[in-house]
Image (cartoon, rainbow, N blue to C red):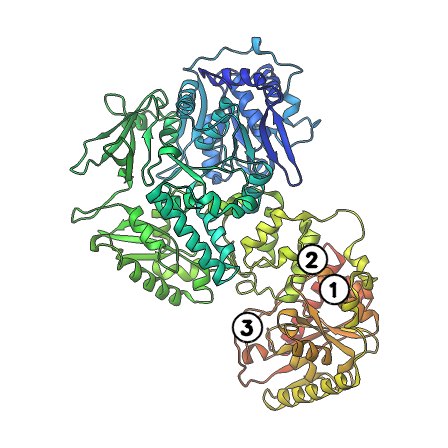
């Protein structure tokens, strides 16, 4: 779009020359919003004029603390046009580091949005910057549009030179606290010009940017280069996999700008999807991939677009190029991406170099290398050894002049003749391609003089089954490691068993390493290792983690409570930047406050959410968080991370209209004919079978488990009633059925998980004979509660386990509000019940019971009105649930069998 790029102000002024071509395609939850070049240029200049009119001066840092959006780009361009300094801040930065960056930069104004705005308000700042909201309503006084002038006023703005500061980035802090890196207009313009010179893209390209703009790599390439090229920036609605795929399709992306971790996830998702189709499709896919790879490597044929055209059509119809930066792309992964039919471009650089130093162009890419130096970049390898390996040093117009307010660090960063010390070890081949071999500052030198590249050892560790992530460091003269295990491998193991499993995995990894690269000491971290948003290991934090994780402290690290946000993986932190996701996470932390809660926690195995638990949990998310999860979404959820991802994609529940309680007063409207047929009277043979099964159950419970009932003949009222027992074991329903007077049992309906009680024809028939109603955890709360309400409405009685799942430790868990909705909708009488002994006889996850006495105690029946007055809580259903829980707890205490 512009032939010469002297300053970024020049770029902003030239935007309107792009006329009606698309500059931005931004996807929202429901639509694709386009900004044309003329609109982007005009709006940016109106905002820049407004900033100048408000007193923002030349060279003044202005913050940007917000997720990517078209408005982020508008604010960025306006700051540059006004002669101020763009200061992008990571929305996931820990509070101490974010506070440091804000105070260190001296920003007085900050553009913000969403969860980042909330975080900003919570910081303890002596002089908080003024917040300008990018997501405010168009007429809101706190919104960015209120700062816009009526028309651009370029003549009243300062004229910027190449030497003027354009941006102030804060490094991700891989080796220490974030440092300010000031870049001039000339630095960034020179780097963008070099990339344009090697034809990194085309004017008709649509470049998808799922990376945060606070990092210089997507900032320079995803904004500056794209606009200078006259191309289009495509912004996904979120960084979730389905939204990135949606952006590739609906944004019609031709180029994907990513980091290695993104391509690892993409590659894994493709292979997992194929594997789900069965063995034959998986073998066929692997054969095609192998053939495409060999054809590319030895014959130069690009067979991928033909062999995998179906995949391209479904996922990314127009995508031709994937670009990887931010970290080295694994050579094997790069070849797989090529084999799938995409061209691969890679590069190497640092924040301090604006950022690109080398580029590996697709037409002459050398997999495994960092590429060729960019035009205008002077690279050298200092003091090379016999293999030509030494520190990579850089000089050129794209290299910064020094760190912000850190003269000592600046002096150490440059050689006497003006080369910047990158700290990376590398060598050149005969054709001038740069190959990197790790970072000099991260090399580990053992007492015997051996130089160890920790990344090599880390790659060997994570290649072993059971180790999800690994960080290597030196400890007492030996190589040591912090190992983060795969949760699926260690689930259900205690600390000692986890240690043994990691010892086994470490032995396997050491077997594949030279003796001086083998890890002699390790500690297990149940939480993800500290990494930056782009996936780099924060090694100074790794040392802190290693110190904290004394071997005997693993059990303490597994203690109940939510995983702190700063210890989560980058993608999980980014998920929490979505407001509704954070609300759900906070609700889960309260709901499961007695469990260890992490994104990897299994909803069923770790949190104990069974069929009734799903009913209550989805109801809670609907009522408290405004989230309405579809049935097909529930079927995909295995872990907390899965739930959070589905929440990010889910529709918000309607704020108005008929409530679920009102719907339950006419439950037949919630049910179809097949479901209603479950409530029809049993036929004679079904009734007789049920009586036989009940007789067998009573005999088993009284003979083997020595069942005792208090009182011996429960005084239960006529009419619809709901038994509300505690829930410890799969034996609870059997014990309760045996404890009821035999004449009353046919009145009662029971909830049964469809995955067991309705998984075959014979089980469906037995459920029919015993009045078991299907509880589908993937059907949402309305269906299960509707069946229960319909049973009560027809004069039947019901048993409802209000804890929502079996207790993991035998202790009474909080009762969920679903029981309150059910009782209120039908005005049924509730009977609290305490069951003791079933946990000892058959705790959760045990397949066979052992002999142990069981006691069932029936409490005093209570009306809805009594319970609502007795309990505490904001909502009536909560008060009812808590009153019942308190009654059951009191019964346990009275019997001396607290559970």
In primary-sequence order, the first of circles 2 and 3 is 2
Q: Which residue is mark 2?
A: 619
Label 3: few (<14), some (14–19) or many (≥20) C-alpha neighbours in 10 Å: some
Image marks 2 and 1: residues in contact by CB distance under 8 Å:
yes
Mark 1, secondary structure of its residue: helix
Q: Are marks 3 and 1 in contact (CB under 8 Å)?
A: no
Q: Residue at x 57, y 39 (%)?
A: 247
Instruction: Decide if residue 83 is on the left or right side of residue 444.
Output: right
Q: Residue at x 78, y 64 (%)?
A: 672
* Residue placed most toward the observer, 204 or 492: 204
Task: Name the residue tied to disc 3.
Answer: 844
Quarter of the figure with the C terminus? bottom right
Q: Position of residue 189 (x, y in %)?
A: 43, 20
Relative height, residue 303 to residue 380 (above, below): below
What residue is rendered at 41% in x and 25% in y?
A: 195
Mark on residue 785?
1
Placement of 21 over or under 255, stated as above or below:
above
């Amino acid at each position: 779009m512009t032939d010469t790029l002297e300053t970024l102000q020049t770029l902003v002024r030239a935007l309107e020359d792009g006329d009606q071509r698309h500059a931005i395609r931004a996807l929202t939850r429901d639509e694709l919003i386009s900004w044309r070049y003329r609109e982007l240029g005009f709006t940016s200049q109106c905002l820049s004029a407004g900033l100048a009119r408000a007193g923002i001066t030349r060279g003044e840092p202005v913050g940007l603390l917000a997720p990517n959006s078209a408005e982020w780009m508008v604010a960025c361009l306006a700051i540059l046009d006004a002669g101020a300094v763009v200061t992008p801040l990571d929305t996931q930065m820990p509070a101490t580091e974010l506070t440091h960056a804000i105070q260190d930069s001296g920003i007085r104004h900050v553009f913000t949005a969403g969860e980042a705005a909330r975080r900003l308000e919570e910081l303890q700042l002596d002089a908080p910057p003024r917040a300008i909201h990018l997501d405010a309503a168009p007429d809101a006084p706190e919104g960015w549009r209120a700062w816009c002038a009526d028309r651009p006023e370029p003549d009243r703005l300062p004229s910027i030179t190449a030497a003027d500061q354009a941006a102030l980035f804060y490094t991700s802090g891989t080796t220490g606290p974030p440092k300010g890196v000031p870049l001039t207009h000339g630095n960034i313009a020179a780097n963008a010009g070099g990339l344009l010179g090697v034809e990194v893209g085309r004017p008709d390209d649509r470049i998808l940017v799922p990376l945060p703009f606070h990092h210089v790599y997507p900032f320079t390439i995803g904004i500056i280069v794209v606009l200078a090229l006259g191309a289009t920036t495509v912004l996904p609605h979120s960084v979730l996999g389905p939204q990135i795929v949606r952006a590739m399709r609906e944004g019609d992306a031709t180029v994907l700008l990513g980091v290695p971790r993104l391509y690892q996830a993409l590659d894994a998702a493709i292979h997992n999807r194929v594997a789900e189709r069965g063995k034959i499709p998986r073998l066929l896919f692997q054969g095609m991939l192998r053939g495409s790879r060999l054809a590319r490597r030895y014959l130069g044929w690009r067979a991928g677009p033909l062999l995998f055209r179906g995949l391209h059509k479904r996922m990314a119809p127009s995508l031709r190029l994937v670009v990887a930066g931010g970290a080295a792309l694994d050579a094997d992964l790069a070849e797989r991406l090529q084999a799938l039919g995409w061209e691969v471009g890679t590069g190497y650089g640092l924040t301090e170099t604006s950022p690109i130093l080398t580029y590996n162009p697709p037409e002459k890419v050398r997999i495994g290398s960092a590429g060729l130096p960019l035009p205008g970049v002077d690279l050298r390898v200092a003091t090379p050894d016999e293999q030509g390996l030494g520190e990579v040093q850089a000089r050129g117009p794209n290299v910064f002049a020094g760190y912000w307010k850190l003269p000592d660090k600046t002096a150490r960063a440059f050689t006497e003749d003006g080369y910047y010390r990158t700290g990376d070890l590398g060598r050149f081949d005969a054709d001038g391609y740069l190959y990197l071999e790790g970072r000099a500052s991260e090399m580990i030198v053992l007492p015997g003089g051996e130089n160890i590249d920790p990344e090599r050892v880390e790659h060997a560790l994570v290649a072993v089954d059971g180790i999800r992530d690994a960080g290597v460091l030196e400890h007492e003269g030996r190589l040591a490691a912090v190992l983060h295990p795969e949760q699926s491998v260690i689930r259900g193991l205690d600390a000692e068993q986890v240690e043994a499993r990691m010892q086994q995995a470490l032995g396997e990894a050491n077997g594949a390493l030279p003796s001086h690269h083998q890890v002699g000491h390790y500690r297990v971290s149940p939480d993800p290792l500290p990494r930056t948003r782009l996936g780099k290991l924060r090694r100074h934090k790794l040392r802190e983690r290693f110190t904290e994780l004394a071997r005997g402290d693993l059990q303490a690290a597994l203690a109940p409570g939510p995983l702190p946000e700063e210890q989560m993986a980058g993608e999980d932190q980014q998920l929490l930047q979505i407001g509704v996701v954070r609300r759900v996470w906070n609700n889960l932390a309260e709901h499961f406050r007695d469990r260890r809660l992490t994104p990897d926690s299994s909803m069923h195995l770790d949190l104990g959410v069974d069929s009734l638990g799903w009913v209550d949990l989805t109801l809670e998310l609907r009522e408290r968080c405004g989230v309405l999860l579809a049935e097909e979404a529930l079927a995909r959820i295995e872990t907390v991370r899965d739930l959070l991802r589905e929440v990010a994609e889910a529709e918000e529940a309607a704020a108005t209209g008929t409530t679920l309680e009102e719907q339950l007063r006419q439950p037949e409207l919630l049910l179809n004919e097949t479901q209603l047929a479950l409530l029809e009277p049993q036929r004679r043979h079904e009734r007789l079978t049920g009586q036989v099964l009940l007789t067998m159950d009573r005999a088993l419970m009284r003979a083997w488990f020595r069942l005792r009932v208090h009182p011996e003949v429960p005084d239960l009222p006529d009419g619809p009633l709901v038994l509300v027992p505690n829930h410890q074991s799969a034996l609870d329903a059997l014990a309760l059925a045996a404890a009821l007077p035999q004449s009353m049992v046919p009145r009662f309906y029971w909830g049964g998980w469809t995955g067991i009680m309705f998984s075959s024809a014979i089980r469906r028939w037995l459920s029919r004979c015993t009045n078991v109603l299907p509880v589908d955890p993937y059907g949402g709360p309305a269906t299960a509660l509707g069946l229960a309400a319909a049973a009560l409405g027809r004069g039947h009685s019901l048993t409802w386990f209000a804890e929502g799942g079996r207790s993991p430790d035998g202790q009474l868990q909080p009762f969920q509000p679903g029981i309150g909705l059910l009782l209120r909708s039908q005005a049924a009488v509730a009977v609290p019940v305490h069951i003791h002994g079933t946990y000892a006889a058959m705790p959760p996850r045990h397949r066979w019971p052992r002999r142990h006495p069981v006691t069932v105690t029936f409490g005093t029946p209570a009306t809805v009105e009594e319970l609502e007055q007795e309990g505490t809580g904001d909502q009536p259903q909560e008060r009812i649930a808590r009153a019942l829980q308190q009654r059951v707890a009191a019964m346990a205490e009275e019997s001396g069998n607290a559970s």
